[in-house]
Image (cartoon, rainbow, N blue to C red):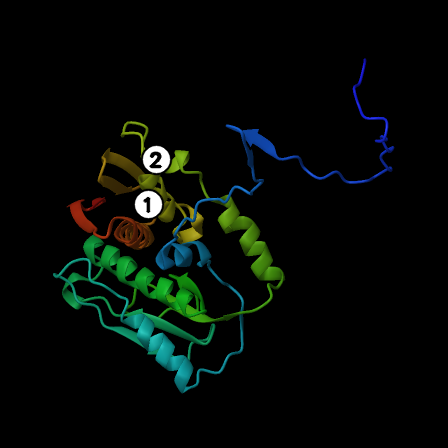
């Protein structure tokens, strides 16, 4: 190969491991500057961060509930929004819980105790409190059985500060931990429409909702571009209806954050829809 160069210029051998500067490329007669391609900024609403951050904690450390701590918990109670005007739940805080730093619960309405609608309402309101507590840096766990349960209440929300997992907690996590959750395909009705990207975010927010033994007793179906139905599957009647309410809370919160509006409608005892 022939090379045309001035005799006064010499080609110096490149040193080993010597880095070469990137060359500028030319475009339309002008030298284009090298620049990094920035990734587009994706704004993630706080509630979606809380949904992702929330996890069931089974080991709590001692944490004194002083006045400031109690104020944060009381503020979280205000997050409980009613799903139906037919039922009123009065949430209480008990600092004498045998587990965690306290527990939150509400008594079922005597005339409607055990009804599916009440249990769905309980899960819906209670999970809104859980997400608010998560935002306030508290660890939480739903308890429908065990020593923390309160008579007349279908379940309690234990809260406090998470401790390093002990042997028992690790064993429980291995058996029923979040890693064992079903994929979105497993909880999505194949007879429904294909979900759009924003709908997938709503669906996934419901998919990762807590449930008894992490069994995820739900089936989601995309019915239109602005509606998703949620159906309860078979299982323990009391637990699965509470789980249904918890999933609806996640779906409602995600839809409202993404579309600025959301509505939950009861179709039948086991099926609800979320629209926006």
* Image x and y of residue 97, in percent: 42, 76
Identify residue for label 1: 202
Query: Which picture quadrant has residue 201?
Result: top left
- On screen, 203 above or below 249? above
Using residue 261 as the reference point, say whether residue 150 is left or right of it: right
Q: Is residue 95 visible?
A: no
* Image x and y of residue 165, in percent: 59, 63
Q: Which SS class for mark 1?
A: helix
Name the outermost residue toward the left: 86
Q: Which SS class for mark 2?
A: loop
Q: Earlier in the sequence, mark 2 or mark 1?
A: 2
Using residue 67 as the reference point, say whether residue 124 is left or right of it: left
Task: Point out which mark residue 265 bears.
Answer: none
Identify residue for label 2: 188
Which residue is rendered at x = 21% and y = 51% of the image?
262
Q: For mark 1, does the 10 Å Cα neighbourhood hold few (<14), some (14 to 19), or many (20 or more) residues? A: many
Which residue is rendered at x = 38% and y = 67% of the image?
157
* Image x and y of residue 1, in percent: 81, 13
Looking at this view, is 45 or 15 the one in front?
Answer: 15
Query: Which picture quadrant has residue 227?
Result: top left
Name the outermost residue toward the bottom: 67
Looking at this view, is 242 or 128 the one in front?
Answer: 128
Using residue 222 as the reference point, say whether residue 103 is left or right of it: right
Which residue is rendered at x = 37% and y = 48% of the image?
205
């Amino acid at each position: 190969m022939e090379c045309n160069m001035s005799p006064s210029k010499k080609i110096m051998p490149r040193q080993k491991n010597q880095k070469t500067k990137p060359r500028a490329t030319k475009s339309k007669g002008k030298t284009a500057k090298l620049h990094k391609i920035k990734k587009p900024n994706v704004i993630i609403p706080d509630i979606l961060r809380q949904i992702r951050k929330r996890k069931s904690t089974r080991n709590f450390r001692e944490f004194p509930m002083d006045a400031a701590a109690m104020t944060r918990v009381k503020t979280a109670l205000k997050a409980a929004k009613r799903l139906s005007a037919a039922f009123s739940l009065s949430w209480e805080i008990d600092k004498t819980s045998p587990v965690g730093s306290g527990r939150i619960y509400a008594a079922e309405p005597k005339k409607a105790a055990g009804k599916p609608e009440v249990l769905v309402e309980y899960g819906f309101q209670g999970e809104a409190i859980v997400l608010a507590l998560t935002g306030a840096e508290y660890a939480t766990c739903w308890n429908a059985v065990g020593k923390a349960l309160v008579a007349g209440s279908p379940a309690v929300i234990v809260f406090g500060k998470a401790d390093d997992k002990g042997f028992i907690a690790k064993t429980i996590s291995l058996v029923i931990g979040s890693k064992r959750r079903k994929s979105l395909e497993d909880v999505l009705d194949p007879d429904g429409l294909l979900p759009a990207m924003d709908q997938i975010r709503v669906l996934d927010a419901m998919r990762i909702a807590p449930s008894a033994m992490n069994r995820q007793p739900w089936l989601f179906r995309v019915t239109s571009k602005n509606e998703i139905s949620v159906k309860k599957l078979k299982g323990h009647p009391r637990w699965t209806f509470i789980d249904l309410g918890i999933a609806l809370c996640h779906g409602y919160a995600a839809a409202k954050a993404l579309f600025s509006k959301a509505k939950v409608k009861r179709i039948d005892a086991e099926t609800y829809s979320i629209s926006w």
